Image (cartoon, coloured by chain):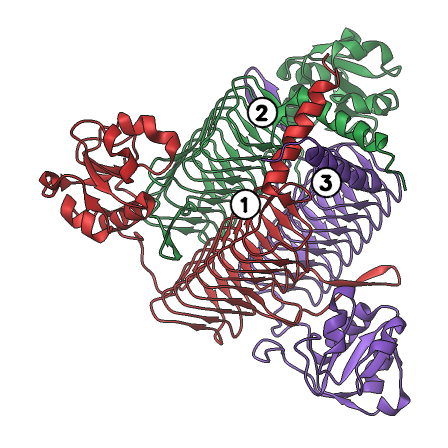
Chain colours: A green, B purple, C red
Amino acid sequence: MVDTDFFKKNGNFKLKVLAELSESKIANENDAEKIIRNVASLDEAAEGDITFLQNVKYVDAFRNTKASACIVSKKYIDIAPHGLALLISDDPNYAYAKIAEKFYHKDNTYISVATEAFVDTSATIGARSQVFPGAYIGPNCRIGKNCVIHPNAYIVNSVIGDNVIIHSGSRIGQDGFGYAFFKGKYHKIPQLGRVIIENDVEIGANTTIDRGAGPDTVIGEGTKIDNLVQIGHNVKIGKHCILVSQCGISGSTTIGDYTIIGGQAGITGHLKIGSKVQIAGKSGVMTDIADGGIVGGVPSVPIKNWHRQTVAIKKLAESKGNNE
Amino acid sequence: MVDTDFFKKNGNFKLKVLAELSESKIANENDAEKIIRNVASLDEAAEGDITFLQNVKYVDAFRNTKASACIVSKKYIDIAPHGLALLISDDPNYAYAKIAEKFYHKDNTYISVATEAFVDTSATIGARSQVFPGAYIGPNCRIGKNCVIHPNAYIVNSVIGDNVIIHSGSRIGQDGFGYAFFKGKYHKIPQLGRVIIENDVEIGANTTIDRGAGPDTVIGEGTKIDNLVQIGHNVKIGKHCILVSQCGISGSTTIGDYTIIGGQAGITGHLKIGSKVQIAGKSGVMTDIADGGIVGGVPSVPIKNWHRQTVAIKKLAESKGNNE
Amino acid sequence: MVDTDFFKKNGNFKLKVLAELSESKIANENDAEKIIRNVASLDEAAEGDITFLQNVKYVDAFRNTKASACIVSKKYIDIAPHGLALLISDDPNYAYAKIAEKFYHKDNTYISVATEAFVDTSATIGARSQVFPGAYIGPNCRIGKNCVIHPNAYIVNSVIGDNVIIHSGSRIGQDGFGYAFFKGKYHKIPQLGRVIIENDVEIGANTTIDRGAGPDTVIGEGTKIDNLVQIGHNVKIGKHCILVSQCGISGSTTIGDYTIIGGQAGITGHLKIGSKVQIAGKSGVMTDIADGGIVGGVPSVPIKNWHRQTVAIKKLAESKGNNE
């Protein structure tokens, strides 16, 4: 149950209102006037709540939910518990997102630029952008409109678009990791590029994005980056990509649009990764990947090959008579 | 040798005092009145110091130590150097911990809530809890008694028990990584759960713990989390678990009690990991694990099978005549 | 093109001046008086710019560059485009570093110790060292000369040499991860060592270095550490090592000089890793490595064996008739 100490509810809504705003359809028109009081997960939901089923793992929870309404895809209509009002959606996840947004304010605090933030006088902050205490914004940085810069985030040498969210402890625009080895020592190579973050990007907590060495490091529009991710200098990431926690992308690699990089995956430098690529968690990518490629393993191979490899190794280990 | 600039010593102690407080036994009662002046490691110890032997790798250092006393398990009595006073303990590590605590104050600074911390006026901080400069505690958070919140830690949407230590740069309670993909864009799903941290938990530097999407994210009593760990939304971790540095747990996975997760291991979302499970470092866990399971590899398998796999691959590579 | 909002240019220079300071040689003396106005990458360079070729992947960009001058090694002279002035260097990377430094100030801000930094009154900060806002320096820490401590860095229980750069969000000197398990609970072992950082070290953003348990944690002179790296307690790292992003070194491991550790690699505790060792990205090192060893894989093996293993597994998977 949502803790109203932390999240303020805006009121109750009729099911038909929620159906409309979530682009879903009420299965039974008799339910249209039903009053919905809150959102909840399948197993925590009670009378008055609306919930949703997205992951097939939770079908049992769906059969037993005590919610008053549930957002589901068409195929689950027949197994719905008796008396449960249904909203039919092709994407219950999305429908739920719109409904949860309706019930709850996005934020329970609003500040513009906190006096306890460290913002250089030459930096520009767009309208309705928030900068929380302890955040640092260096000289000449440009932050767009409707951004949220959370506490202790650090931004230097960067140009940031509109509607960008930067979570606590993100480090954006520091020197890339570039040295020339000469006469027994590593010499720092000046890093003269910037970080460019396009509109609608979200960057997770404690993620690090180095500025370019000469060219810029670029994060394309709508891309979402999780926590503790590392992005090296000169990397270009396309639009609407997903980078899951603890993955790392080495310097000068470029990535297309709509590509998904799994958790703890690593990508070597100077590679070209296409659009709509999927990289399994923990993969080690050492070669270019064409558009639409799906890979796994270290070094990464097409995902089917990787599955064959893991099966083959399993069989090999069993067949060797190595049993103790 | 302990640097007294950083760590203040409380005095010297008789060996019998140290034996009692550490629940260990003096091997030779003639040593009971010996004065011990400090703690030190086996190879750095000198006259007047007490040291300990825990790891079999250091038996040679034990034979050659210049300490005046050493905490050991029974089996090493016979190989002790002549003149070394022995404290016999089933767990020399623990006995050393109690003795080192006796010699040294836990902290060389005490503050309650620093004026340079950013604490929302609606947050509550329990008795004897410390909040260091640059830490951020958001609206309505509740922090228990005897907690230490180190500099630049960030806590929002969270309820925290007693005796909890949160190291510098930890990020607790930010949005989970949840989006609905719809019409070519990722839409943020409101994250309406909290982070609940039970008593006696310790959370390492720069570790990130996302708040729940609807249910809470929970860290059970006595669990210890190392640096740079990622905990996704809705994760439930049981009591007295150990999470080693740079491991990551994806959203909605549950973990039992007394489970140990090795460094850089990754666990997929929506899994059930039992109690007293051990997951080797760098493992990639993609399936549920029953109580007491010990696993390794990517994808993870029972540890014996993993060892067989690595042996089988080694042999295969050698047998192929691939030598250059 | 370098954005002069962020990086201030010092002027234009004759090619002969740049040749001299970069210890390189002008291929054609007729080019000596040529005026160079800026640095740029091969593909972004225009009339008046100097660029460089280091990585063989960019030979095509070299053939087509619009730069006025380029730093290259001897072997590329013959394929240089007509009219391009050449500086010949054994290490174009280094020559470029010196030239880029000449064109640009290292920093576009200079502060000494920011009033918004949290510096304990007992800490000492050497001449010409900078401490940025939000940085925290604890009791009795000693920071040498010409250091840069970036915003939100955290340093306690540490002694730091000269010319050290510590990036934003680094955590240095917190408790190591040490517990004694006793009667069903983990008991904290007092961590009584320091962190010693020698001269000319650079430490990346959000990297964590725990202080020693008894002995110190030591980072040797000239070693460069990337972002999000974890260094456990008691670790000793030699001189002039490179640690790439997201690698982790467990407690009490020692590492020699000139060793390179790849991204996301992990090293178990209590190991001895020699000098001039190279550890591939994503490796899992579980055994000692002699001087000059080159390893890869999990568990790591000599790199040639690792390549053989990956080839053998590939063949095995293909030969099994597993094709769908």
Q: Nearer the viewer, residue A190 or A182?
A: A182
Chain for disc number 2: B
> Relative to residue A146, is residue C169 depicted above or below?
below
- Inter-mark Cα distance, 1 to 3: 18 Å
Q: Secondary structure at mark 1?
A: loop
Residue at mark 1: C262
Residue at mark 3: B283
Residue A305 image point, x, y percent: 67, 21
Q: Residue at x 80, y 91 (%)?
A: B34
Residue C203 visible somewhere in the drawing: yes
Residue at mark 2: B187
Q: Amino acid at mark 3?
A: Ser
Query: Residue B282 is drawn in which quadrant?
Result: top right
- Inter-mark Cα distance, 2 to 1: 35 Å
Task: Same chain for labels 1 and 3? Say yes or no.
Answer: no
Query: Foreground mark, 3 or 2?
Result: 3
Q: Is residue A129 left or right of residue A62?
A: left
Q: Secondary structure at mark 3?
A: loop
Q: Amino acid at mark 1?
A: Gly
Which class describes the residues within 10 Å of circle 2: few (<14), some (14-19), or many (20+)? some
